[in-house]
Image (cartoon, rainbow, N blue to C red):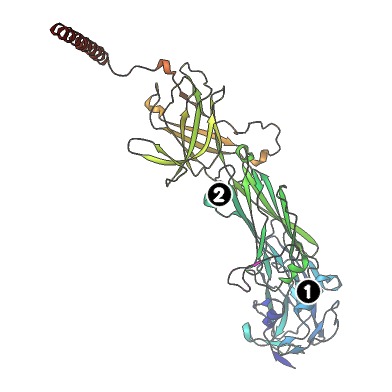
Amino acid sequence: MKKMKKVFAVMLSLAMVLGMAMTVSAAGTKPVPADSKKVTIENVEKGATYAVYQIIDATYNENGFTGYVWAEGTSMAGQKVTFEDGAVVGLTSDEITKLAANPGALKEKNENFNPDKDELTAGTWMVLVTPPETNAIKTYNPMVVSVFYTVEGSGSNNTLVTDVLDASENWTLETTDAFAKSSEIKLDKKLDDVEFDTEVKLGQDVSFTITSEIPSYDPTYYKNPVFNVTDTIVNGLKYKTEPVVTVGTDGVGEGVKTLTKGTEYTSNYDANNDAFTITFTPSYITSLADKSKEEREVNIKYSATITDDAVVMVGENKATLDYTRTPDETSTKEDKEQVFTFALNGVFGKIGDDGKALEGATFTLYEKVEKAGAATTEIKWSETETVNGIVFGEVVTGADGKIDFKGLDGDKTYYLMETAAPDGYSINDTIYKIDIAFVDPGDAYEGEDVTYTITVTKNKPNEGDGEDDLTKTYTVTLNGTNKKGDTEINVGEFGNEASGEKINIPNTKLGNLPSTGGIGTTIFTIGGCAIMIIAAGLFFASRRKSSKDSAKEA
């Protein structure tokens, strides 16, 4: 009996074979075609399905096992398997992927294989894994597992029996298990500056990055793979810059490479549209088959501008990945990102001293900044506190007296001041500090309405205000993207009104200004004027008398 030392993990270098399973011992019993054992297949996601096809078969006679032959359906069907330096001659990764591309010709198969329950007979089997139809996270290349006879123990020092084995031998049945060679399907869409660009101002530019990873698609198994990334603006944004596509990771292989449009990918980007698609060419996709995951990482960067629509409804855009899931099927994966901007609607109003809405008052909203500059205004909040602000916007009240602003950044603090009064009225010099509180729902956001809180603090009370009127809080509902296309939404350019009692800022007519000082002041003023008049009269009378006396002497 010819024996050859061989660890069947040699298959690892050829077809991803790994490890050893439990030993089945059968001393005194001859090997038979029904001998079988479970194999272990690792690194496969839950919900995936398996199909196994025999590519090397065991042969038997009346005495037991006689050797291995290539299975029916292979290019060398019926021929004896030969070994060289412990490896199966002809069992290459290219041969396996060719068989995987057209497995129907292989006779022995189980296309509903369950590795937790089913056993495989002696020989080598090709395993094809199909990802779940929904929520798949990986793609898979073909792999092999083996069940084989040995006569020496277990572990890494087995003796593989390649010829005759009968009942006189103390044989065991071993397996080489498989660690699935897979590629993770990931899609991650993020703001480049999440801390500052989630809550934004109207007209602000924000930048996004879509990160993915082109799977390792063997060109023999995957004939025409698809890998397309589509970005779609759902609401509140307008594209500003054309996407830049790079592949690779710093410090790995060739590092980061900027891809060429029209060569490695195509793009239908148009700044006036609300979507674009990056389509990677099949030849470029398969050229990455032997690269590491770091070398196959793709980043798509672009910027967009916040528009008025984000005031009425949550600003959102999403990325969709269309990719080859199996050689014959494609699947999709989606990720999205939101931006939020805020408004003052129904928080402030302007009234005259008659309590009615007052037209023609000018209000300026300042955004607080840390450093003074040429464009900043000094705002005296109190006797001991001064802040710097830049002009965010200006409103002149109409007949309704409303003082509304839109597109505020929730990360900023604002100050509202009356900077010009209507003709015949005095300026109200009370200053209003505005803070916005908002909790970003993050990845949990599913299109529902969101709310934010506005807190207004006065630096001093207006006439008639109580101590409780110095600070007021309002709640505002921002429509969710689930309402996109809902014809019942009709909230105007400033979005939904804040819930809470409006702060009516009073102005007083100049003719109605209250007197300052007491009655004693008036008396002293009148008395002083009278004394000055009498003194002047006495002065002129004295001069007249002097003139007459001078004339007589002459």
How packed mark 1 is, by other alpha carbons closer than 10 Å (few <14, some 14-19, many 20 or more), is: many
Which badge, 1 or 2, is on the more N-terminal residue?
Answer: 1
**Mark 1 or 2, closer to the camera:** 2
Please determine whether, in this image, residue 228 is positioned above or below residue 81: above
Q: CA distance from mark 1 to mark 2?
A: 47 Å
Residue at the spot 78% in from the left edge and 81% down from the top edge: 32
Please determine whether, in this image, residue 511 is positioned above or below residue 10: above
What kind of element bears circle 2?
helix
Q: Which residue is mark 1?
A: 97
Query: Which disc is residue 231 wearing?
Result: none
Name the amino acid, label 1.
Thr
What kind of element bears circle 1?
helix
Q: Nearer the viewer, residue 156 or 246?
A: 246
Magenta-tinted stretch: 250-260
Residue at the spot 22% in from the left edge and 12% down from the top edge: 536
Residue 194 located within the stretch drawn in magenta: no
